[in-house]
Amino acid sequence: MLQGWVIISVSFAYLGLLFGIAYYGDKRADAGRSIIANPAIYALSLAVYCTTWTFYGSVGRAASAGIGFLPIYLGPTLVAGLWWFVMLKIIRISKAHRITSIADFVASRYGKSQLLGGLVTVIAVVGVVPYISLQLKAVSNSFTILTHYPDIVMPAKAATQALWQDSALYIAMTLAAFTVLFGTRHLDATERHEGMVAAIAFESVIKLLAFLAVGLFVTFGLFNGMGDIFARAELVPKLKALMTVADSGSSYGSWWSLTLLSMLSVMLLPRQFQIAVVENVNEQHLRKAVWLFPLYLLLINIFVLPIALGGMLHFSTGLVDADTFVLTLPMSERHEALTLLVFIGGLSAATGMVIVETIALSTMICNDLVMPLALRMKALRLNERHDLSGLLLGIRRWAIVAILMLGYIYFRAAGEAYALVGIGLISFAAVAQFAPAIFGGIYWKGGTRNGAIAGLLGGFAVWGYTLLLPSFAKSGWLSSEFLREGLFGLTLLRPQQLFGLTGMDEISHSLFWSLLANLGFYLGVSLTSRPSVQETRQATAFVDVFRHTVGTAGGSRLWRGSAQVQDLLPLIGRFLGPVRAQEAFLGFARGRGLASIEELKADAELVHYAETLLAGAIGGASARAMVASVVQEEPLSIDEVMSILDEASQVRAYSRELELKSQELEAATAELRAANERLKELDRLKDDFMSTVTHELRTPLTSIRAFSEILLEDPKTGLAERKKFLGIIVKETERLTRLINQVLDMAKIESGNAEWHTAELDLRAVIEESVAATSSLFNDRHVTLTQDLAAGTPLILADRDRLIQVMLNLLSNAVKFCDPARGLVHVSLRQEREGLRVDVRDNGSGISAADQKIIFERFRQVGNTMTDKPQGTGLGLPISRHIVERFGGRLWVQSEPGHGATFSFTLPFNQGTSAPAAAPHPPDRTSP
């Protein structure tokens, strides 16, 4: 039985596990060993986009709109393809200016305006509160349903319950406490929470596994696969309509609007901006995220429609809310473990969203609302406090509690009037209002602060009138006449048919009018207003971020004035803490080659560094105001700013040109150096080759000449002796012939004129044939040969005769190097991941490491008269190596003096292609 205490215990244990992961991640980050410096973890953390809306609500929407649930995930999938251009630019800007939130981003772009940052914060909080209520509703409902296990009982309306009996209140309080402990343990100037990101990535895995588990259970446990579900649904007219766009209740216009809405939201929701931009540790991680994140969306949605159809077929009475199918379907079959896993998956989806969203919003509230006001209120005497870091943490913690309580209030007031997806779409439409100011700000220098303010106010007002207020009217908190008759009784002002526009769903209707107003005001006011000096400076810094990074040292050129280190250091210490401020300034001093802070001069670069450092704690707008309070800045005119920027651009362009020329010169020099070294190597190899050939030729010729002279000069030599000497001459002649053939063969291979007869081969058969051909040699030398040849190995693509040549060479060498008293040679063939491997091992005296290199690097005989070195290697091994490499393999030797030697080579499997072209020689290897 899933009793209440079991559910609560498992839930707290899971939350404790998340806290442990976050704690471990933060500790590793403090030690300089980040666990999130991995593109896969970055991509998984982006899946915080998938909340309880996805986990529970997508099935509910699919049950009413069929495949109309897809646009919410098509949008992110499509826009992910543009991330390497758009998101990369946003990340680059944010790193250069130490951006801490989406409000800070907008405020910094338009002259570091505190008013604009505050406006964005208000819109974000009001817009996201419904989304937070969605998480509370989903977790509360799933908990209530689970406590009635095994009976399936739908939860009562929250408004009908007493406050102290509402589980959503306790869930909100628990999540508030957990988030405070989770994300505000300390103040970080970079505003990164590496432990949080690691925990969010872990949660993404858990909710995906849970959803896939219930999807597999419904599809293959309750039914006989997807085909069975769809076939049964075809027999029910209501369900059949859900499987087509035209009949599912979702118009094509709705698809377009929802796709656009989700494209904007996946980048502009505060939690998505926090994870994708602020928490990014390496912009190169985007390369994997652009395909791994869409893959995640595909996997978590693949069973949505089967679960929705299966739930409607299973619960044919219609008494079970479709938003709960993911939980109630396993409950109906009494699968306790799966039911509990689904609950934990839903809890993961909710906690991930709540943690990141409230941390992002609390940072915005602190930096862009509370602190700007508090610093202006002299009665608070903040200027007299030496350490404000505790105050900043306190503000953020109370902000988290306030946000969750607002979410609970909205849940009690209006949350029951909408399905989960409907609540989420209200928030999506709110954050879409940031689009003109952000995307216009990073691509158009003409956007102004007044234009951004006008656009945001206009769009937010229309959103509130057409979506937020109707949600309260549907809940009974406002008169329904407001919806039917419009404001002041004017039908043209009906919120869901504004100005007589009909035929659209409420989300599409609100999105159309709000973005039209937003974009119209933004463009109109920007074109008719003149930007300030600060706006011009920031516009250039943002739009041209890839051409020059104004935000590092370059930004200091746009500042002129006077300052003192003894004023800047205490200022930074008040917000970051004295110790961290000292460490930061000391690091800056050492970066400039100075030994201590006392040697620093308060020049433009230090002032700019102090401002960006402070921006990480209180936001760019407040940081600018605080730095301005302790320095004396001389204002620059717009002409001066533009002149400096033009000069900087010209200098950078010239520097870039010089850099490119220098790189081209270095590349050309390197090529010449490499060519010269190659020529020297060829000369050396030629000399070594000639030395080897002449040495090999001289030995048999000397023997032939010596025995011939004996036969000619001593006619009294007996018949037996003459036969013996003639036999030696014949053997030496055969050796000479073999050597000449090897030289010719080597020359053909090197020149590319050798004939190759490539075909599919069974390497085992080639080895067996080679062993048979050398059997007499083994018998004559009394050498024992053992074999271990794998059967059924794949075919290879090579020249049969050439491979036999390789095997004969290796086998004959092995016989020569064996122990003279008890010779033993072992041949093995086995299959590896890359291909087939052949080993020929002897039990001779072995080869030293230095001599192994000599064998392959210099292609020469190594000391015929030395007993501890191989004898008579000649040209056989170089030819063998060329043959093996010709077919994509490699040949090497392993040996220890006194323990024999093993010559090995590998050949790749035949992949069904034609014969390979001659491959360039890989680097010489003496071990695998």
Image (cartoon, grey):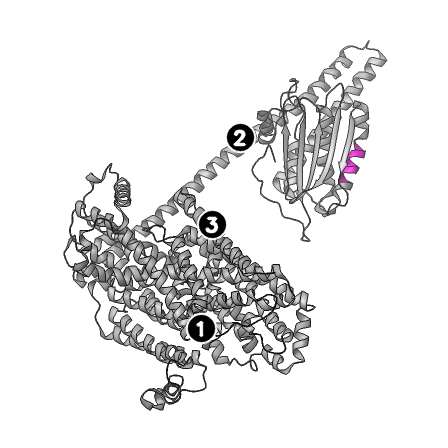
Q: Residue 423, labelled with which disc?
A: 1
Q: Which mark is residue 21?
A: 3
- The stretch in magenta equals 766-774
Foreground pick, 173 / 88: 173
- According to the picture, the residue beneath numbered tag 2 turns out to be 684
Q: Quadrant of the C terminus?
A: top right
- Residue 557's x, y, as percent? 21, 53
Mark nearer the N terminus (2 vs 3)? 3
Q: Classify mark 3: helix, strand or loop.
A: helix
Residue 465, horizontal then vertical, whole percent: 35, 80
- Dot 1: few (<14), some (14–19), or many (≥20) neighbours within 10 Å? many
Specify the amino acid type for callout 3.
Answer: Ile
Q: Which mark is residue 821?
A: none
Can residue 773 be found in the magenta stretch? Answer: yes
Q: Quadrant of residue 593?
A: top left
Amino acid at the residue labelled 2:
Arg
The residue lying at 17 percent from left, 45 percent from top is 566
Mark whose residue sits in front, 2 or 1: 1
